[in-house]
Image (cartoon, rainbow, N blue to C red):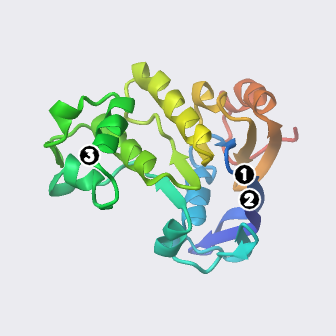
Amino acid sequence: MLALEDIRYSKNSNDIVKGVSMKFERGGVFGIIGNNGVGKSTIGYIIMGLSEYKPTSGRIILSGEDITNLDVTNRAKKGISLLWQEPARFEGLSIKDYLTLNKKIDIKSVEEALDMVNLEPKLYLNRLVDKKLSGGERKKVELASCMLLKPKYIVLDEPDSGIDIMSLDMIVKIIHYFQDNNTGVILITHRKEIAKECEYSYLLCNGKIFLEGKSDKIIKYYEKTCDSCGHINYAEEK
């Protein structure tokens, strides 16, 4: 199990995450849902251990081990991965070379991963991971990279951003791929079409868990209340 225990995070004297506790299990799909600006991505970065996102207080526990002070590299070694909302570019590096940086990954696995994200291997293996790729193409390459890593836990930060709406079925297929491979999926989203794939979800507002439970319940509340909210981060009583 991966657990956040009373996590708080402040930056420039601003309280951004305010006592958040969450639990995630391998093989499950969990949602972190909420409007833009409520702290969803920040929690994802805290889970991944990015250097600028060290909790002010609280603990992160992985399989009984306190990993709060581990850096991003050591968390990755323990099986935690993150799909960035805005993937990086790598001038001069081909997609083939990028996806085989881990020498244990063979070309057949790379081709299968590209097929799953709807990128034809023959057309994409030798293309560069640079500005000539569209945002959607780079996102798909990053998804393929995450699949090849076979992580224990994957944080998917707005996996549909920059990707054509016709690719939503592909994203759902990949979520289930992770689940079938016993990866715990932590899905950060404000899209109900994506959130419905989760089993259990946390609804955030103002850096706090406003509501949690089975995802269908959370989605109904989100649609009714948060979609049309005119006072983001000033939560009313449930």
Secondary structure of residue under mark 2: loop
Alpha carbon of mark 1 to alpha carbon of mark 2: how far? 5 Å
Q: Quadrant of the N terminus?
A: bottom right
Using the image, determine if residue 207 lies above or below residue 171.
below
Which is more toward the observer, 24 or 213?
24
Q: Is residue 101 found left or right of 70 in the rendered image?
A: left
Q: Is residue 125 found left or right of 1 in the rendered image?
A: left
In the orientation shown, which residue stands out farthest toward the bottom? Answer: 69
Secondary structure of residue under mark 3: helix
Give, as a three-letter code, the residue at label 3. Ile
Q: Which residue is mark 3?
A: 107
- The image's mark for residue 1 is 2
The spot of residue 35 in percent (x, y) is 61, 40
Q: Which one is in front in this view, the residue at disc 1 or the one at disc 3?
A: 3
Which is more toward the observer, 3 or 7?
3
Point out the tag, 1 or 2, that comes first from the N-terminus.
Answer: 2
